[in-house]
């Protein structure tokens, strides 16, 4: 399927849309340029008028002040210093006042000016900046000069001093501080325009806001160049204007100029009264930035429009493909962890095979993860899975590969290496990292992992076989937990056997393959006190399977409760029948697994078994292992109490090999301690084992418990245990496990001896 296979007419419409939208884009950008230019022209127009009006107002105000001072001086030939001081305080532009006579001699000055002015002639101080003859009753403006007295750049202004007859006798002068006037029309206040004031005809400058102080001397010492004046006249003529027309109509002229090849927007206007020009200019480049923003905005809209219309056209053919892509992502990724799910595994392996890449498949299972879900809830379990997947993903920083969440708490890592040593090092590092604590909502969680490893092509070439081998190896590793195992033929054969045992176990009870034997328990006087029921399995297909082999499988596959109930029912039935037959009474000990004991209805099933298969007079002992105590005592104690109420004894089997502590022994109503065979085996030659056995017996006595030793293989074992005060004895020295018929003979023999 071709993504862009639209017909000719459809594409023609699309191309027409491109042409129309391109024309609209160009038109819009041009219109925006005109708008920005018009705005800048309007701003400059008003700035020019306002500056001219402001300068005119300042000069007019100062002319009035000079007239008043002139009039006052004419009357009494001296300055009123108080009035002058008040004037200067209110105007930060003026530097002071002076009066010179017609020959240039200083007649008077304001007190704020230095006395050395009396040694200065007006020719040295003022006249250099005035370009023209002194006019009667006219305020004249000088170009900017550097005051030799104050060392400040000033703009001198002067007006004739008249006597009572109206004749010129000198002039009164002041000066505007250039930098103070410049501040009034900063770059910001002038909307980005540079302001220049020039004298008429001479075109000397007396203000230029865009000029730095270090260039004042070069700027104000010379008039505008002939080139500048000629260029200005030339652009004015293009609009039908010239300097004379502007002098006459007092208007504002706006032109485009390019001095030094820099395009400028320039405005100028003439002040008739004080004979100066106002020039405002700004670079046209100021328009570039807002125009660029506008152009980018319009271009974005343009491209967006083109993209949307293109996508709209393409959508006709591509909708189904988009839906399929989204659905594929959902189906290929795990919602909780974000990593690949098991559906992708085949494709990932196919890609590796296609590139002839050897790889290893690591099948990872979290140990006892169910306990976290059960104890803290699935919310914590989900967060823990996310953290685990993050660690697994980070492990791929050291070696290329992919992570797949295979099922609940099982992950598959495909790493692009099958070198056994490298993979072994990777697995060790992974186990260490995974075993570090996880912090979730201020709770620390510790969880380990079991890893099975299969390598391609060393172990297998098909994915199903690789997964099977890795999963089975993981199951083997799980027996010890926090372990990794490479697949091997030995592992394979062992797993095949285990699988056969598992399958056969499902039908063992129905096929009547499960039988019971009983091992007698005697006291010091060799009197029979009880028997322990032991399960045996003779498979019609596999032969004899030892309990230590099939019991763990029954635990793993969930068959233990069913098998345990069968053992309970059958043992109670056989022993009850035997005791009735021989008119004797002894205890029956039945081993109960953890999974069977923690069933919600365990006690009810136990009582039902007694009622249906046993006898209320039958002394019954339930043997539990120390691993049961990993469960909460709050759950166990109610069951223990019910058992005690019905005179059912509780024995702790394999004592000393598991999780029990003295505090648990104190809390749990244990009647009997069974010393594990591993402690008894070497008491004849190992003093440590001997001391431990003695301590266990003493502890049991102190806690008012019976103590039973199992695994007694010799007379020496029996003598040592008897010497230490052991109550009951069990083992091959006493008797091997007996079927019910053999037990009947054994019990008869014991009864006759006694």
Image (spheres, rainbow, N blue to C red):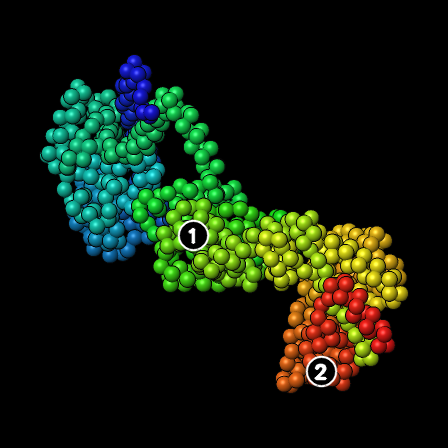
Q: Residue at x 14, y 42 (%)?
A: 222
Question: Which image quarter: residue 251?
Answer: top left
Q: Residue at x 32, y 50 (%)?
A: 357
Check residue 715 in the rendering and tell me which mark sits there, or answer none. Answer: 2
Query: In the rendered view, does 649 fall on the left or right side of 502?
Result: right
- Mark pair 1, 2: CA separation: 55 Å
Query: In the rendered view, does 437 fall on the left or right side of 577?
Result: left
Q: Is residue 281 above or below residue 416?
A: above
Q: Name the residue at the top extreme.
A: 9
> If the image is split into quadrants, where does the C terminus sit?
bottom right
Between 259 and 158, the one nearer to me in the picture: 259
Q: Is residue 65 visible?
A: no
- The residue where tag 1 is placed is 361
Q: Is residue 752 visible?
A: yes
Where is residue 205 shown, x and y percent of the image?
Answer: 20, 39
Task: State the SS at label 2.
Answer: helix
Q: Residue at x 67, y 54 (%)?
A: 513
Q: Judge the density around disc 2: few (<14), some (14-19), many (≥20) Cα neighbours within 10 Å.
A: few
């Amino acid at each position: 399927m071709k993504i862009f296979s639209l017909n000719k007419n459809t594409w023609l419409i699309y191309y027409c849309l491109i042409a129309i939208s391109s024309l609209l884009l160009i038109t819009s950008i041009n219109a925006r340029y005109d708008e920005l230019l018009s705005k800048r022209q309007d701003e400059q127009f008003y700035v020019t008028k306002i500056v001219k009006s402001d300068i005119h107002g300042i000069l007019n105000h100062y002319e009035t002040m000079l007239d008043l001072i002139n009039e006052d001086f004419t009357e009494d030939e001296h300055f009123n210093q108080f009035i002058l001081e008040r004037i200067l305080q209110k105007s930060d532009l003026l530097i002071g006042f002076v009066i010179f006579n017609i020959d240039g001699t200083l007649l008077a000055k304001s007190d704020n000016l230095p006395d050395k002015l009396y040694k200065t002639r007006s020719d040295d101080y003022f006249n250099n900046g005035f370009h023209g003859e002194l006019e009667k009753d006219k305020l004249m403006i000088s170009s900017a000069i550097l005051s030799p007295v104050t060392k400040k750049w000033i703009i001198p202004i002067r007006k004739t001093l008249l006597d009572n007859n109206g004749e010129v006798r000198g002039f009164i002068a002041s000066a505007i501080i250039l930098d103070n006037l410049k501040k009034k029309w900063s770059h910001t206040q002038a909307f980005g325009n540079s302001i220049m004031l020039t004298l008429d005809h001479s075109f000397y400058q007396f203000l230029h806001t865009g000029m730095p102080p270090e260039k004042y001397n070069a700027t104000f010492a010379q008039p505008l160049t002939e080139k500048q004046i000629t260029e200005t006249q030339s652009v004015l003529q293009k609009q039908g204007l010239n300097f004379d027309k502007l002098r006459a109509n007092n208007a504002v002229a706006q032109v485009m100029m390019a001095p030094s090849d820099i395009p400028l927007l320039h405005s100028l206007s003439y002040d008739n009264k004080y004979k100066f020009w106002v020039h405002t200019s700004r670079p046209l480049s100021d328009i570039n930035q807002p125009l660029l923003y506008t152009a980018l905005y319009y271009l974005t809209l343009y491209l967006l429009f083109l993209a949307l219309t293109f996508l709209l056209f393409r959508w006709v053919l591509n909708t189904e493909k988009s839906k399929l892509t989204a659905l594929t992502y959902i189906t290929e990724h795990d919602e909780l962890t974000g990593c690949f799910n098991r559906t992708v595994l085949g494709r990932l392996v196919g890609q590796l095979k296609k590139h002839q890449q050897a790889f290893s498949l690591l099948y990872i299972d979290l140990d006892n993860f169910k306990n976290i879900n059960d104890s803290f809830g699935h919310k914590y379990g989900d967060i823990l899975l996310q953290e685990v997947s993050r660690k697994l993903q980070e492990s791929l920083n050291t070696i290329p590969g992919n992570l797949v969440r295979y099922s609940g708490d099982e992950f598959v890592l495909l790493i692009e290496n099958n070198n056994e040593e490298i993979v072994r090092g990777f697995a060790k590092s992974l186990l260490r990292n995974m075993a570090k604590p996880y912090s979730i909502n201020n709770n620390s969680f510790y969880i380990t992992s079991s890893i099975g490893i299969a390598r391609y092509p060393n172990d297998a070439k098909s994915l199903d076989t690789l997964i099977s081998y890795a999963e089975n190896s993981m199951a083997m590793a799980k027996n010890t937990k926090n372990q990794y195992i490479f697949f091997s033929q030995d592992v394979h054969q062992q797993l095949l056997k285990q699988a056969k045992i598992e399958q056969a176990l499902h039908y063992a009870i129905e096929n009547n393959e499960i039988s019971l034997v009983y091992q007698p328990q005697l006291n010091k006087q060799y009197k029979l006190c009880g028997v322990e029921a032991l399960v045996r399995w003779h498979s019609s297909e596999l032969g004899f399977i030892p309990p230590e082999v099939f019991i763990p499988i029954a635990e793993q596959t969930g068959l233990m409760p069913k098998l345990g109930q069968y053992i309970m029912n059958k043992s109670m039935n056989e022993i009850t029948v035997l005791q009735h037959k021989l008119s004797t009474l002894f205890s029956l000990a039945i081993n109960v697994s953890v999974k069977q004991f923690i069933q919600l209805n365990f006690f009810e099933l136990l009582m039902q078994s007694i009622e249906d298969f046993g006898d209320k007079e039958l002394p019954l002992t339930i043997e539990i292992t120390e691993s049961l105590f990993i469960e909460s005592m709050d759950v166990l104690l109610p069951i223990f109490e019910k058992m005690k109420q019905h005179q059912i004894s509780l024995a702790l089997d394999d004592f000393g090999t598991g999780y029990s502590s003295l505090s648990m022994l104190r809390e749990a109503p244990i009647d009997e301690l069974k010393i594990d065979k591993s402690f008894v085996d070497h008491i004849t030659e190992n003093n440590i084992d001997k001391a431990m056995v003695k301590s266990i017996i003493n502890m049991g006595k102190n806690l008012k418990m019976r103590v039973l030793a199992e695994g007694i293989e010799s007379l020496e074992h029996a003598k040592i245990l008897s010497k230490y005060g052991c109550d009951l004895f069990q083992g091959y020295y006493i008797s091997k496990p007996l079927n019910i018929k053999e037990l009947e003979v054994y019990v008869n023999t014991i009864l006759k001896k006694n």
